Image (spheres, rainbow, N blue to C red):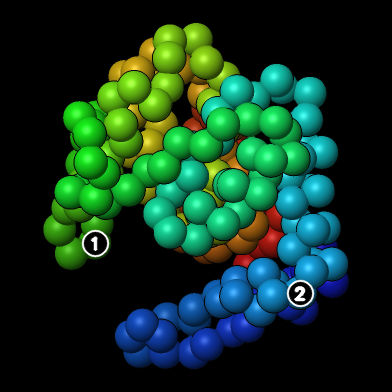
Amino acid sequence: MDDLKKLIRNIPDFPKKGIMFRDITTLLKDGRGFARSIDLLARHYGGKRISKIACIESRGFVVGSALAYKLGAGVVLIRKKGKLPCKTLKQSYELEYGTDTLEMHLDAIKPGERVLVVDDLLATGGTARAVARMIEKSKGALEGMAFLIELTALKGRGKIAGYDVYSIIKY
């Protein structure tokens, strides 16, 4: 995946000192690179008969929507608290500096629907775990979690152990 890794822009000390931000906008603007990324994700999950892609705000919307199109699946938006207009299912999760809450519409996933969680980045795994809990509460069948990038040193896979986790670029 070195060809795709070269399309990621590294921004030191963003959003704060000591953080190396992995900017996917440079990958997204490269048509061939973006298509290859989506094709790799689709190949991994193509045989799973995914019915919904749960896209995590906000860069996950871009990746997840393209993948949903490729797999013929619907899109479920996972948003921060207060951003969705209808009744929602909520899930709070821990951050290093407090807690946050994610929401999805109550009617977004029907019992038994096969759902894939998609985001641009797997870091600590807290966000992905919160989304998994919402899908399970809605009685959806969580088929896996897909990410463009995984920051392996942060050990996010540990928080989502037991799920099929696939990432195409690792740092």
Q: Residues within 10 Å of mark 1 (few under 14, many from 20)?
A: few
Q: Residue at x 63, y 83 (%)?
A: 9
Name the amino acid, label 1. Glu
Q: Secondary structure at mark 1?
A: loop
* Quadrant in which the N terminus appears: bottom right
The CA distance from mark 2 to mark 1 is 33 Å
Front disc: 2 or 1: 2
Direction from residue 15 to residue 43 in the image, left or right: right
* Residue labelled with disc 2: 30
Residue 50: % across, % down: 64, 24
* Residue labelled with disc 1: 96
Name the amino acid, label 2. Asp
Residue 153: % across, % down: 52, 63
Count of numbered marks = 2
Residue 47: % across, % down: 79, 23
Q: Is residue 141 visible?
A: yes
- Quadrant of residue 51 within the rendered picture: top right
* Quadrant in which the C terminus appears: bottom right
Direction from residue 128 to residue 60 in the image, left or right: right
**Residue most toward the top?**
112
